[in-house]
Image (spheres, rainbow, N blue to C red):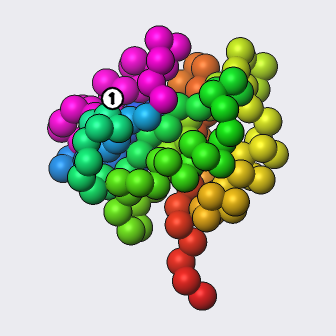
Amino acid sequence: MHVSSTAAAGPADRLGFKPGMVVQELGWDSDSDDELRAAIEDAIDADLVDGDYGNDVDSVLLWWREDDGDLVDGLVDALTDLVGGGAIWLLTPKVGRPGAIDPADVAEAAPLAGLAQTTTATVSRDWAATRLVTPKAP
């Protein structure tokens, strides 16, 4: 039986998480994907930190649902501890799932929060991830 080499690349690897990174998690709730969270913790070889961390972080995982409020405000808040060059991974329920957000709303909110959308990835059965970064100066 042939095993594909891509099978080893889990969602945490596809999102670019590496050992030693400090990853802040915001918006966790009981519907968040625990398998994805565990895979990210394995990839960074550390626990995720929460919003009270208070130091610089390399990346932010922002779980966001339709009823979580204003997305622009959520994105701006997520920038608080993020180091320059870091990324926010906006995790939203997939289209058709409860709490799903229209991709057009993400595309509209990102620039208002001073962010650029770079990549979208499916990370679990119920969640999609959108990578948002601070645009490089022209």
Name the amino acid type tagged 1: Ala
Q: Residue at x 44, y 39 (%)?
A: 61
Q: Residue at x 65, y 48 (%)?
A: 72
Residues packed near mark 1 inside 10 Å, few (<14), some (14 to 19) or many (20 plus): some
Would residue 73 be found to the left or right of residue 41 on screen? right
Report whether residue 4 is seen: no
Q: Position of residue 15 (x, y in %)?
A: 44, 45
Q: Position of residue 30 (x, y in %)?
A: 47, 11
- From the image, tell me which residue sits under label 1: 39
Above/below status of 17 relative to 113: above
In the image, 105 versus 40, the foreground residue is 105
Quarter of the figure with the C terminus: bottom right
Q: Which residues are magenta?
A: 27-48
Would residue 55 be found to the left or right of residue 89 on screen? left
Please tell me in which quadrant of the rendered image residue 38 appears. top left
Please tell me in which quadrant of the rendered image residue 87 appears. bottom left
Q: Is residue 102 magenta?
A: no
Q: Residue at x 58, y 19 (%)?
A: 125
Q: Position of residue 50 (x, y in %)?
A: 32, 34
Q: Position of residue 90 (x, y in %)?
A: 56, 41
Residue sitting farthest toward the bottom: 138
Q: Residue at x 63, y 28 (%)?
A: 68
Report whether residue 26 is seen: yes
Please tell me in which quadrant of the rendered image residue 116 appears. bottom right
Above/below status of 59 relative to 114: above
Would residue 102 be found to the left or right of residue 65 on screen? right
In the image, 67 versus 41, the foreground residue is 67
Would residue 58 be found to the left or right of residue 47 on screen? right
Residue sitting farthest toward the top: 30
In the image, 101 versus 20, the foreground residue is 101
Quarter of the figure with the N terminus: top left
